[in-house]
Image: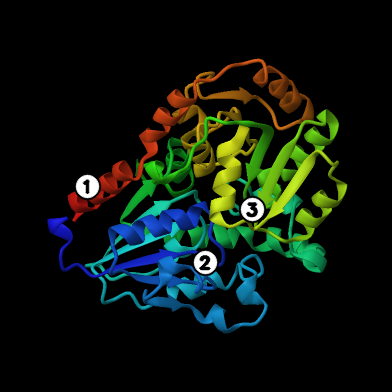
Amino acid sequence: MKKLENKKVAIICDWLKDFGWAEIVISHLMEIFPDADIFSSVFFMGENKIFLNKNIKTSFIQKIPFLNKSHKLALTLRPIAFESFDLSSYDIVISSSSAESKWIITKPNTIHFSYCHTPTRYFWSHYHEYINMLEFWFLNPLAKYLIPKIINKLRIWDYIASQRVDYFIANSQNTKNRILKYYNKNSEVIYPWIDIKSIPFSEEKWDYYFYNWRCVPYKKFDLIVEAFNKNWKKIIIETNTDNKLYRKLKSISNSNIIWKFNLPKDELNNLLSKAKWFIFPVDEDFWLAPIFAMASWTPVIALKKWWALETIIDWKTWIFFDNQNIRQLNNALEKFETMEFDAKYIRNYSLNFDKKIFKQKIVDFIENKI
């Protein structure tokens, strides 16, 4: 990292409210650049030790009650918030973005790298899905009326902001294609990573499926509950999201569906390592959870779409189902249970996503560009 010595670096985040896979990528960037300052629209993760002694700078949204805890309701404020950050003293700025953090404004001598998880999903690729599954509670009717009237202006704003980025890094080939389609910008694919060697694994597998993540509409928790209510197979579902959808799905789940809420990391790792199967029913750009499962010697059943097709060897580590419906998923589960998987092969395959590879590729890319 000789070229990066004495360079002042800032890392920009959409928001920092809970610790998920996007935040894992941020923690990786912080590991590469330990002296970097952190900018975010809001910050509510002071208890997390990775932010200990870090210089965290938040926007004016942090001081607005209610809106500071709801990134959806602060949608139209975040562009203004990110454009208001003064980054004039930095040599390198790295935005980790699936939303508006790339909207920052930098001086000509500052190089802006954007690690893009996806072009802003609710403006572009998943706009209609978001409109049909709004989460503004009693404001849903108003939001459904207003958003279509302003979406074109938001898209223009988002496109203009994307042109300020000097270099895009995509988390998958699918994201690379979307960056080109929506922003007309080229990008380099560097897959996210996890610390494979730190992940516990178990040869002892218990007879249950496992799924975890934020309980939001496009993560398809509803599909899993409907399918497992019908097939009566055992599944453990973990989430750290306490919302209307979570409470509704939990209330209608049969006894074979066991919900866990906001588990400590050790308990979550243990459940994943003991699971016989992991489910990935999501149309996602890139998701680290299935890689985490494979590192735990756990095979994955996945929706046959997008990044899964880039990185997975069918039948040796995963099997696929074609459409997000109950019949397709349950048919795939029946097939899945007749198959045998080589746990050590699955673990070894996950090493393709080890942190050493990611860190070296990120450093090489940035050094080559500066």
Q: Residue at x 74, y 49 (%)?
A: 259
Residue 7 place in picture, x, y as percent: 19, 67
Find residue 364 and name its label.
1
Q: Nearer the viewer, mark 2 or mark 3?
A: 3
For label 3, the residue is: 214
Looking at the rendering, in which quadrant would you find the N terminus? bottom left
Quadrant of the image occupied by residue 319:
top right
For label 2, the residue is: 15
Give the distance between the C-alpha atoms of the residues marked 2 and 1, in whole angstroms: 27 Å
In the displayed structure image, the side of residue 5 where residue 30 appears, left or right: right
In the displayed structure image, the side of residue 369 where residue 292 appears, left or right: right
Q: What amino acid is at disc 2?
A: Trp
Number of on-image labels = 3
Q: What amino acid is at disc 3?
A: Arg
Q: Residue at x 52, y 35 (%)?
A: 202
Residue 238 place in picture, x, y as percent: 67, 49
First reached walking from the N terminus: tag 1 or tag 3: 3
